[in-house]
Image (cartoon, rainbow, N blue to C red):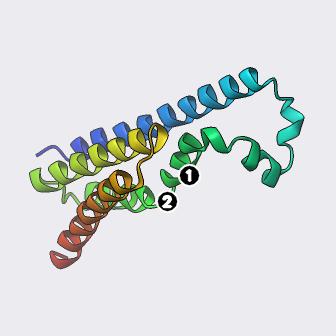
Amino acid sequence: MEQQQIFAPVTALVFLTLLVWLFMYHKRLGFMRRQKLDPEALKSKTEGEKILAPVAGPSDNLKNLFEMPVLFYLLCIVLFVLSRVDATFLNLAWAYVGLRALHSLIQSTYNRIVHRFSVYMLSMIVLVWMWLRFALAT
């Protein structure tokens, strides 16, 4: 197996993060235009969060994409450096990215907690499985 294949799901997760970032600004700027808000009203973090609460889903999701995925990025780099990428790790990596994409879709749109949490937990199971598989074979 070509080791650099692990960077395809890594790149997909990076592009998901960028897509959520763009969607966040699309939602925020549209909301601000519709509400005729002065951007200066958002200067205070507390006030800004209150004002933008109706469109907070994408922003909250963007923050999430800089939390647990860091462990995914790290493991993928370590797998590459140690030439440990195999079909199982690659499939698990794609599963993780797919679940994170679904999580982003849910949180950035209708945000039903039971759906979002279920997908989040599945993604965490995949990530923990990847780390355990790596650690136990070391």
User: Picture quarter containing residue 131?
Assistant: bottom left
User: Picture quarter containing residue 127?
Assistant: bottom left
Residue at image point 37% right, 47% down? 103
User: Where is the C terminus found, in terms of image quarters?
Assistant: bottom left
Report if the CB atoms under discs 1 and 2 are less than 8 Å apart: yes
Which amino acid does the dot numbered 1 rest on? Lys
* SS at mark 2 in the image: loop
Residue at image point 39% right, 38% down? 105
Which amino acid does the dot numbered 2 rest on? Glu
* Picture disc at residue 132: none
- Apparent side of residue 15 relative to residue 119 in the rendered image (left or right): right
- Apparent side of residue 39 relative to residue 71 in the rendered image (left or right): right
Residue at image point 17% right, 56% down? 89
The x and y percentages for residue 30 are: 66, 23
The x and y percentages for residue 17 are: 47, 40
Residue at image point 86% right, 44% down? 43
Q: Nearer the viewer, residue 105 or 129?
A: 105
* SS at mark 1 in the image: helix
- Apparent side of residue 129 relative to residue 40 in the rendered image (left or right): left
Q: Nearer the viewer, residue 103 or 93?
A: 103
User: Picture quarter containing residue 48?
Assistant: top right
The x and y percentages for residue 18 are: 50, 34
* Picture disc at residue 67: 2
The x and y percentages for residue 71 are: 40, 62
The residue indicated by pointer 1 is 63
Q: Nearer the viewer, residue 121 or 6?
A: 121
